[in-house]
Image (spheres, rainbow, N blue to C red):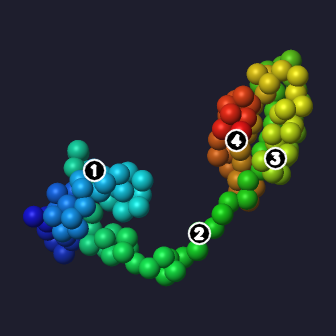
Amino acid sequence: MPKKIGSLTLYSVDDLHEMLGMSKMSIRAYLRDGKIKGKKLGVQWYVTEEAIRNYFEEPDKAPPKRTKKIKYIVQGVNDLVSETEECETLNETLETLNSQAIISLFQVKIIDAETDEVLELIKARDFIERHR
């Protein structure tokens, strides 16, 4: 049974299971992945009516997703290697890494090109494995 807090109605995983006929495991996976927006209070997930409506809206009504422009900085990890190279594309970054004699001396800084925010710092070998 949904919980009422003032004018707000909150639905639990059990409520959604009964209303939608979906498995509880699927509902929890949707919540964890952000497909359905919800909040966890203690160990229990809760979803608002608005979040349910948003899930069922047609995709073309949702605002277009803005893709981030990414740049990659290949840099040495210690004083032995002071080399730094900025790459614009994934392929350029992989070529730069593959041209290095000792991969373990490098890391890749993944940066949002518009804000210069560092999104991730990853070891060169892990970067290559991820994008192989």
Picture quadrant where residue 43 is located: top left
Q: Which mark, residue 65?
A: 2
* In this rendering, the label closer to the viewer, 2 or 4: 4
Marks 1 and 3, how far apart in space? 38 Å
Residue corresponding to mark 3: 91
Identify which amino acid the numbered label 4 is placed on.
Answer: His
Image-based side of 52 in relation to 35, left or right: left
Sequence-wise first label, 4 or 3: 3
Image: 21 above or below 77: below
Question: Is 28 positioned to the left or the right of 5 in the image?
Answer: right
Displayed quadrant of residue 47: bottom left
| Disc 1 packing (10 Å; few <14; some 14–19; many ≥20) | few
Identity of the amino acid at label 3? Asn
Marks 2 and 4 sit apart, C-alpha to C-alpha, by 23 Å
Instruction: Please state the horizontal and vertical placement of residue 122, each as a whole percent of the image.
Output: 67, 34
- Is there a contact, CB below 8 Å, between mark 4 and mark 3? no
Identify the residue at horizontal 21%, vertical 71% (top origin). 8
**Circle 4 residue:** 131
Q: Answer whether labels 1 and 3 touch (C-beta < 8 Å).
A: no
Q: Are discs 2 and 1 less than 8 Å apart at CB?
A: no
Question: What residue is rendered at 20% in x and 61% in y?
Answer: 17
